[in-house]
Amino acid sequence: MSKNKDTLITDDPSQAAKVLKGGGVVLFPTETVYGLGADSRNLKACLEIYKIKNRPADNPLIVHLSHSSEIPKIANMNAFAKELASSCMPGPITFVLSKLDNSVFSTGLPTVAVRVPSHSKANEMLRAFGGPVSAPSANLSGQPSITRFTDAVHEFKGKVDLILKGPEPTIGLESTVIDLSGPRPRILRPGFWSLDDLKDFLPELDEFSSEDLMQEEEKPMSPGTKYRHYAPNANVILAEEETRPKSDAAAIGIGLSDGWQYSVDLKDNAEYMKSLYSFFRDCDTKGISKIYCFPPTEGRGKEALLNRIQKAADSNLP
Ligand code: TXA
Ligand code: MG
């Protein structure tokens, strides 16, 4: 897509709301990653997002709301959703629920994904807009999501109508997506909240891993899971603990040794989550061809990190 739009860059959320009302596309920060948003009730604006991202038409968008009390207006807020919303919203979690409002953009599914970001600017924009905003992660389809303002400007200036400036994402990986629409809740995409965390709130949670979802070639439960994902140009390899440093490859991990062409050494999983996508982008800028990702440590973030690293590794070009 050519870069020919006049992109307004501002930290004023009411300007962003105005652009959304006018049918424009807004790039905005959230606590997870940057998003590309449009008025959920404006079909043309929502389709524009697919064009900008080069996103497959059957991959649905998450509807962003300013408060969990807005959910019942568009989806069936069942007992699972009420329980989880009271513990985890606002925050880095997305609920898949039965859809009630057909005026909200959808790819034809009977369900809709809803999320209430905790990010201050995103929330101010949603409040000023006063309605649902459909938004995928702001990245070209298949590439790593964006977690830095400079990358957002570099990639999308000229392609979107407005870029909202605000605090950088603190989490760094996309929200946990949990399907609450059926008789048993299931995690479709791990994130900050892991299966173990969520089991404390929802003991009914199924041990359904996203690896199983990947096998479902025919009819994946979360359409996004079947596509090339989170991948830099370099070949991504999940390293073994004992993998030795290589002067012709990059590495990311906790407690790395010296000797890599380029490396990012982190202190824990939280830093790892926050750094993974910007590291992938920096490797592309440096023209690096091979990346070793060392395993995260036990505990929060492990599941989500392994999921994203594995998908990036599965996306290696032949
Ligand atoms: O943290 C996030 O969730 C970010 C920020 C911007 O909010 N958004 C994000 O959106 O990661 P996206 O489009 O990159 O990922 C949304 C995932 C996709 O895998 C999509 O298939 C799935 O959610 N999804 C959306 N609607 C769904 C539905 N009705 N049923 C099942 N999966 C759905
Ligand atoms: Mg995405």
Image (cartoon, helix red, strand yellow):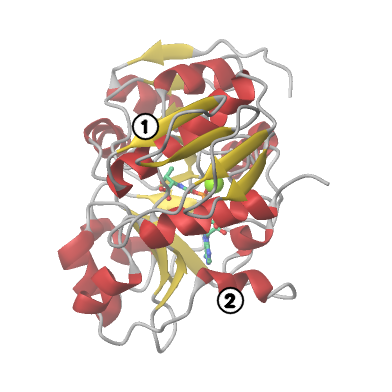
Distance CA(mark 2)–CA(mark 1): 31 Å
Would residue 16 appear left or right of 90 to someone viewing this image? right
On the image, the x and y values in percent for residue 100 come to 43, 69
Q: Is residue 14 above or below residue 127?
A: above
Frontmost residue, 283 versus 34? 283
Q: Is residue 107 visible?
A: no
Question: From the image, which quarter does the N terminus lie in?
Answer: top right
Callout count: 2
Q: Amino acid at mark 2?
A: Asp
Q: Is residue 120 above or below residue 220?
A: above
On the image, the x and y values in percent for residue 79 come to 25, 81
Q: Is residue 85 visible?
A: yes
Would residue 125 appear left or right of 26 to someone viewing this image? left
Q: What residue is drawn where x is 51% and y is 28%? A: 259
Circle 1 Cα neighbour tier, 10 Å, few/some/many (<14 / 14–19 / ≥20)? many
Frontmost residue, 215 versus 153? 215
Circle 2 or circle 1, nearest the eye: 2
Q: Is residue 265 above or below residue 135?
A: above
SS of the residue under disc 2: helix
Q: Is residue 22 above or below residue 99?
A: above
Whether the residue under disc 2 has CB within 8 Å of ligand 1:
no
What residue would you read off at disc 1?
29
What residue would you read off at disc 2?
212
Q: Quadrant of the rendered structure where residue 126 is?
A: top left
Mark 2 or mark 1: name the one nearer the start of the chain.
1
Circle 2 Cα neighbour tier, 10 Å, few/some/many (<14 / 14–19 / ≥20)? few
Q: Quadrant of the rendered structure where residue 59 is?
A: bottom right
Q: Amino acid at mark 1?
A: Pro
SS of the residue under disc 1: loop
Q: Which mark is residue 268?
A: none
Instruction: Please say if the residues under marks 2 and 1 sit with CB atoms less than 8 Å apart.
Output: no
